[in-house]
Amino acid sequence: MNKAMTILYKVHNNIYVNLTNKCPCACTFCLRQTRDHMEDSDPLWLEHEPTFEEVIEEFGRWNVEEYDEVVFCGFGEPTERLELLLEVAAWLKKNYNIKTRVNTNGLANFIYNKETEPMFEGKIDTVSISLNTPNPERYYELTRSRFGIESFDGMIKFAKNVKKYVPNVVMTTVSTTLTKEEEEECQKICDKIGVTYRIRPWED
């Protein structure tokens, strides 16, 4: 396993923020199982988890306003470091005119054993949640969440609640991994809780 201190990296015209390698899931499809980097990045396995100062110093090396969005994602679940994530997001809002997004599994409330949704208000513009499948049993089989089969309902509840505090909430599945019927079920779930459903391309 190659390690580095790749805190920021580019995907399309967005800056991705790699804060942690921790994750409460061990998804069967996770890219981390087959690679240690993304297309244009150095290794994303971290030598240590960065501090706020290290993240801000790294942003100083980038022309932030040339990019469309800052995305908290990386090689781990970003809400594992929620306080740092939100501190960085608040700093970005204060210093730049740029949109912020969190790509998450939606399990932050399990991680912290509390309702975290209000913490996102005013700091995050988009929350993108991995729905994966419309079926709780299949979800658990795919994600192998340490929080058990209750993770699915908890993730749905998080999506429903966080939209009270964040302008744009999206739930995603990956193209070619579901049947058309399953995608229709996912659409119904998203319609019911009032969020956007997006089928995203597979990244191999």
Image: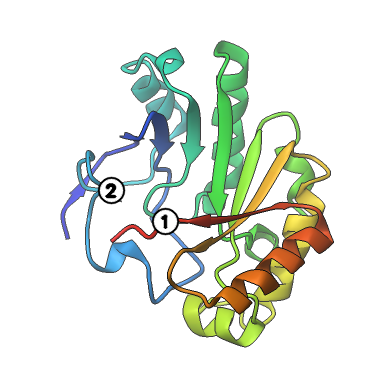
Instruction: Judge by depth and name the residue closer to the eye, 67 or 19.
Output: 67
* 185 over 15 or under it: above or below: below
Measuring from the top left, give residue 76's x and y in whole percent: 42, 55
Asked if residue 114 shows in the view, the reply is no
Residue appearing at x 34%, y 24% in the figure: 58
Pointer 1 local density, CA inside 10 Å: few below 14, some 14–19, many at least 20: few
Query: How many other residues sit within 10 Å of disc 2, few (<14), some (14-19) or many (≥20)?
Result: many
> Which of the 4 quarters of the picture holds residue 64?
top left
Examine the rendered structure and indicate whether residue 199 appears above or below residue 4. Answer: below
Q: Is residue 73 left or right of residue 11?
A: right
Identity, as a three-letter code, of the amino acid under mark 2 = Leu
Judge whether residue 190 can be spotted in this image: yes
Viewer-side residue, 76 vs 99: 99
Quadrant where the image shows the N terminus: bottom left
**Dot 1 amino acid type:** Pro
Q: Position of residue 122 (x, y in %)?
A: 73, 29
In space, the residues marked 1 and 2 are separated at their CA atoms by 21 Å
Percent coordinates x, y for residue 175 in the rendering: 46, 64
Q: Quadrant of the C terminus?
A: bottom left
As drawn, 107 above or below 69: below
Q: How is the image coloured?
A: rainbow
Q: Which residue is mark 1?
A: 201
Label 2 secondary element: loop
For label 2, the residue is: 44
Near-viewer residue (67 or 8):
67
How far from the left and from the top, in percent, is residue 158?
74, 59
Which residue appears at 55% of the width and 69% of the height?
A: 132
Marks 2 and 1: in contact by CB < 8 Å? no
